[in-house]
Image (cartoon, rainbow, N blue to C red):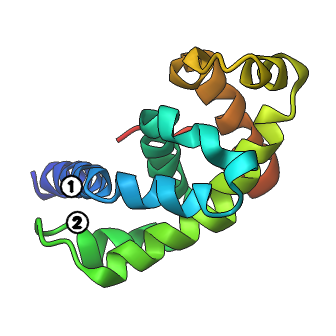
Amino acid sequence: MGDIRRVRLRDIRRIVLAYKVQFYLRGLVGDIASRGEKKYGFISKGRNLVWALTIQALLNDDKIGEFLEDYGADLKVGPDFRERLAKIATIRLAPILNQAISLPSYRDQLKAEKFSFLKSNAFFKVCRNMGADKFDWAYKKL
């Protein structure tokens, strides 16, 4: 019975992390956009994409146990969590997004100012696969 509770607790802490990320989405989008308005100005149209990729980055981080311990047990959101998310946005997400939008079909859509692909599951999978190639991510569920 104790093992089942630990698994449920783990799942709950992962959900708490995901919940907390939503409070910093505007800042994360800003962190990515600040790397170059021409290059990343589109990202404000893809907030949900940033949220989903941030969750994948967190769940694939070598320090996931530390994240869960430090931030998954309560609903407090503090500046240290924000700093960790900012690093993820600039070190992990920005390079993935840059590589993904350089693919011809997405580059052409950006030029035409068609941003609907940012909300597609297909583009999320492209980014997630690039995360797998670049950072050894595996698809993780909450």
Residue depicted at x 29% and y 53%: 14
- Residue wearing tag 1: 16
Q: Are marks 1 and 2 in contact (CB under 8 Å)?
A: yes
Query: Would you say 44 lies left or right of 137 here?
Result: left
Residue depicted at x 82% and y 42%: 99
Furthest-bottom residue in this view:
80
Q: Quadrant of residue 48?
A: top left
What label sits on residue 30 in the rendered view? none
Percent x, y for residue 35?
68, 63
Query: Would you say 82 lies left or right of 60 here?
Result: left
Q: Around disc 2, counting alpha carbons within 10 Å, would you say few (fewer than 14), some (14 to 19), or many (20 or more)?
A: many
Distance from Cα at disc 1 to Cα at disc 2 = 5 Å
Q: Is residue 13 visible?
A: yes
Q: Around disc 1, counting alpha carbons within 10 Å, would you say few (fewer than 14), some (14 to 19), or many (20 or more)?
A: some
Q: Secondary structure at mark 2?
A: loop
The residue closer to the viewer here, 118 or 34, is 34
The residue closer to the viewer here, 3 or 44, is 44
Q: Is residue 61 visible?
A: no
The residue closer to the viewer here, 58 or 117, is 117
Question: In the image, is residue 39 above or below residue 63?
Answer: above
- Ranked by sequence position, the earlier of labels 1 and 2 is 1
Question: In the image, is residue 23 above or below residue 48?
Answer: below
- Residue wearing tag 2: 72
Question: In the image, is residue 117 above or below residue 78?
Answer: above
Percent x, y for residue 132?
73, 45
Percent x, y for residue 127?
68, 36
Q: Amino acid at mark 1?
A: Val
Furthest-right residue in this view:
104
Q: Secondary structure at mark 1?
A: helix
Residue depicted at x 60% and y 55%: 33
Q: Quadrant of residue 141?
A: top left
Q: Amino acid at mark 2?
A: Gly
